[in-house]
Image (cartoon, grey):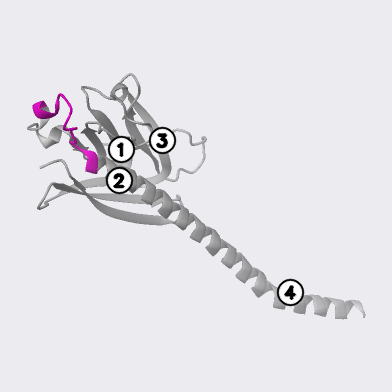
Amino acid sequence: MNLLECLVGLALSLVLVAPLIKNSGQFIAKQIEYEKSQSMTAEADRALELIGRAIRMAGYQNAHSAISSARKNSSSNNYIQIQKNSGYRGSDSLMVKHGISSGVDFDCIGNILSKERTKNNLAQQGFLVDRQASTPKGAKINGGSLICQSLDRQGRIQNTTLMNGIHHLSFEALPASAGRAFKVMLEMTDGTSIHQKFERTFTARNLL
């Protein structure tokens, strides 16, 4: 086999192999995008479940609590507050207050709620979006951080990052036949090609 035959054989091989390499690269890119999308969906489900649980607890008072009767006629605005356009990229923030049940309750970061973690005998759970604090200088920012606000053992507000990649978060009060309903809209991004929107509606069972 002379040099010319070798070159012709190599050229033919490249013609045959090049599409396979291209298709393999596209398949890998699609697989990576799919896995990112699935991970993003799982994160969004977790965030919405935490937010929904807090909304359902808003205004709850233990029947055996000494302050229950004193607070039962309080305005529902004392127990659930929404601040519009107060966070990263105009995201809304939510603050919920509620009593502690006789069972085992958890705040938005998994701490067991106790009397020490209350202020004026009410637990507090908040959700807001802030700019990512840990992003290296010069790195591309893939959205903001979802922050959970809860009370520490001294009854002071503490901020804990739940996840990154939050493009926007909004809360909208809806008319409801029983209780108060809220639509939660969460947008997530990887900062490049993936942008997903998630929406859920939750009802505050203890508010009129």
Specify the principal SS of the magenta part: loop
**Is 91 located above or below residue 33 in the figure?**
above
Q: Closer to the N terminus: mark 4 or mark 1? A: 4
Q: SS class of the residue under badge 2?
A: strand
**Is 106 located above or below residue 167 in the figure?**
above
Task: Count residues near mark 2 (Cα–Cα under 10 Å), then give few for <14, some for 14-19, many for 20+.
Answer: many
Residue position marked by numbered label 4 in the rendering: 14
Point 16% across, 32% down: residue: 63
Q: Closer to the N terminus: mark 2 or mark 4? A: 4
Residue position marked by numbered label 2 in the rendering: 169
Find the distance from the CA under tag 3 to the CA under tag 1.
10 Å
Q: SS class of the residue under badge 4?
A: helix
Q: Closer to the N terminus: mark 1 or mark 2? A: 1
Q: Position of residue 23 (x, y in %)?
A: 61, 71
Find the distance from the CA under tag 3 to the CA under tag 4.
50 Å
Residue position marked by numbered label 3 in the rendering: 161
**Is 14 located above or below residue 183 in the figure?**
below
- Placement of the N terminus among the 4 image quadrants: bottom right
Point 68% across, 72% down: residue: 18
